[in-house]
């Protein structure tokens, strides 16, 4: 009787994950500026959430911090806000991966929606760039629309490129 091969995550799965992460970060810096507006897709957040489901919380937090620092480098006036927000989002996503990130596209979309909205709220509170009614409108109108668009794009990416972004079953 032949032994059955174990289905362990191999080097090919890790390479696919890095390729998916790199493509999403390239889209964040290459595509996002071309379609800028009040409602925009946050490819960096999608990259963080999709990679956090493959990592332990500590490593996910470090990844969120490094991506946040790279985003903060382009906005020196609010340096550290992206790093802090993405660190917390990545840590929370890695910690909650068993609950939300099954292999279900709808739950993934809901999780990305919530992650983007929490990220926008944290960023608005940390940066303090707006206040009063403009803050309320930004957080209750534009942020949910941006979160919905980001979740829609995340679900499309998950369906189209399933081998790159599928979480590992351990």
Image: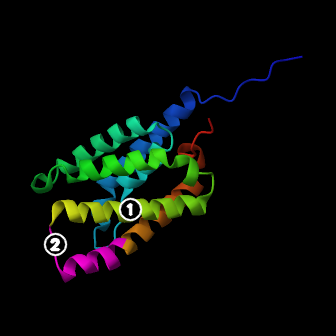
Q: Judge from the rendering whether residue 78 lies leftward or rightward of residue 104; answer left or right.
A: left
Q: Is residue 95 magenta?
A: no
- Looking at marks 1 and 2 on the same chain, the residue that comes earlier in the sequence is marked by 1
Mark 1: few/some/many CA within 10 Å (<14, 14-19, 20+) = many
Q: Is residue 26 visible?
A: no
* Residue positioned 32% across, 46% down in the render: 87
Q: Quadrant of the N terminus?
A: top right
Q: Tell me, yes or no, if residue 134 can be seen here.
A: yes
Q: Quadrant of the C terminus?
A: top right
Q: Position of residue 3 (x, y in %)?
A: 81, 18
Q: Which range is magenta?
A: 129-143
Q: Position of residue 128 (x, y in %)?
A: 15, 65
Marking on residue 116: 1
Count neighbours of disc 2 (C-alpha within 10 A) and say few if under 14, some if 14 to 19, many if 20 or more. few
Of all residues, the one furthest to the left in this rendering is 77
In this picture, is 165 found above or below 40? Answer: above
The residues bearing labels 1 and 2 have C-alpha atoms spaced at a distance of 18 Å
Left or right, 77 with respect to 145, comes to left
Q: Secondary structure at mark 2?
A: loop
CB atoms of marks 1 and 2 within 8 Å:
no
Q: Secondary structure at mark 1?
A: helix
Residue drawn at point x = 44 percent, y = 70 percent: 148
């Amino acid at each position: 009787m032949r032994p059955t091969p174990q289905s362990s995550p191999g080097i090919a799965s890790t390479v696919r994950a890095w390729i998916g992460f790199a493509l999403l970060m390239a889209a964040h810096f290459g595509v996002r500026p071309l379609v800028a507006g009040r409602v925009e897709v946050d490819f960096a957040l999608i990259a963080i959430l999709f990679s956090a489901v493959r990592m332990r919380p500590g490593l996910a937090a470090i990844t969120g911090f490094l991506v946040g620092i790279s985003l903060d480098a382009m906005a020196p006036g609010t340096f550290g806000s992206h790093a802090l927000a993405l660190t917390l989002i990545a840590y929370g996503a890695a910690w909650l991966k068993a609950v939300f990130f099954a292999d279900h596209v709808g739950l993934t979309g809901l999780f990305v929606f919530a992650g983007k909205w929490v990220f926008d709220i944290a960023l608005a509170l940390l940066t303090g760039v707006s206040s009063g009614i403009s803050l309320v409108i930004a957080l209750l109108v534009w942020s949910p629309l941006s979160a919905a668009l980001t979740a829609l794009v995340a679900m499309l990416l998950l369906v189209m490129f399933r081998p790159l972004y599928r979480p590992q079953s351990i």
